[in-house]
Image (spheres, grey):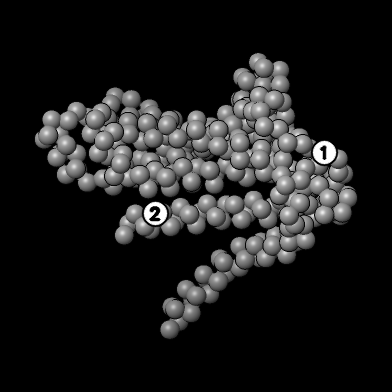
Amino acid sequence: MFVSVAIFATAALAFTPWMSIFASVVLKGARGFKPNFFVGDMRTTIPDDELNLGGAGHAIVGSIMMVLNATIITLPLGILSGVYLTEVRGRLTFLVRFVVQSMSGVPSIVAGLFIYTTFVNYTNSFSGLAGSFALAILMLPTVARTAEEVLKLVPDDLRSASYALGARQWRTSLMVVLPTVRSGLTTAAILGVARVIGETAPLLLTSLSSNSFVFNPLGGPIGSLPTYVFGLLQIGTENAINRAWTGALVLMLLVLALFTTARFIGGKDRR
């Protein structure tokens, strides 16, 4: 009985901070949770205007564009890294695994600074593509490590059966192993997106921000939800902070949706 009570109390203690954060964000962010928030921009609106004016549609679109481009860059590299580590196991296996593990600990601002010095300085312009490159650096280790673990779950019998039919290693990996873990690789992509969707520091150095819709990834500074929230907090007025809380609420809901989807896909795969 005592052990059960202790376990319950420990779980409640660990869960309380998360619930406190969730409740605070929901209660404060709900004030600006209006239709215009999702379709409007701040081009002709100042942050201290009423909450039914302006919006974060431009920031939402910018975040989607940059994360989508980062996923397109990262997913093939991450899956190929996982295949190399589990299927090929060549002489560079140790080096590849070391690089992937080391990248997991790279501070996000360092990734942003790297892209700033190598891409932004070269093009003389902040851009959505630069932001995507910075996010891709942060996404890659998550996707690669998750893909490696998922590929380890494929039974060796499937590989042996493919080899017995005369298939080569690359064909076995492409036609047998990867299709077997489709849902697991989808989970890897989702976890990678959840890892970077709230990053602010690298975007401040690469994509900067914008108050209007930008659909060209090379069309100059572009808005995103994290930089939208950061910029409003810097202003500090009441309605600016309310808008920032709403942006934080949308970000939190997006991350929760991504993790829920990943758990659903993972659970379905196990069944």
Occupied quadrant, residue 177: top left
Q: CA distance from mark 2 to mark 1?
A: 42 Å
Amino acid type of the residue tagged 1 in the rendering: Arg
- Where disc 2 sits, the SS reads helix
> Is 129 situated above or below 199?
above
> Can residue 85 be seen in this snapshot?
no
- Where disc 1 sits, the SS reads loop
- Left or right of 177 in this view: 267: right
Query: Which quadrant: the C terminus?
Result: bottom left
Image coordinates for residue 218, horizontal then vertical, percent: 66, 24
Total marks placed: 2
Callout 1 environment at 10 Å: few (<14), some (14 to 19), or many (20+)?
Answer: few
Between tags 2 and 1, which lies in front?
1
Amino acid type of the residue tagged 2 in the rendering: Gly
In the image, 107 versus 138, the foreground residue is 138
Q: Which residue in the rendered view is the most extreme toward the bottom?
A: 1
Image coordinates for residue 3, horizontal then vertical, percent: 43, 78
Q: Sequence order check: which comes first, mark 2 or mark 1?
A: 1
Pointer 1 residue:
43
Residue 191 bears which disc, if any? Answer: none
- Left or right of 197 in this view: 86: left
> Is 83 situated above or below 26?
above
> Can residue 170 be seen in this snapshot?
yes
Image coordinates for residue 32, horizontal then vertical, percent: 77, 57
Pointer 2 residue:
266
Image coordinates for residue 232, horizontal then vertical, percent: 80, 45
Query: Which quadrant: the N terminus?
Result: bottom left
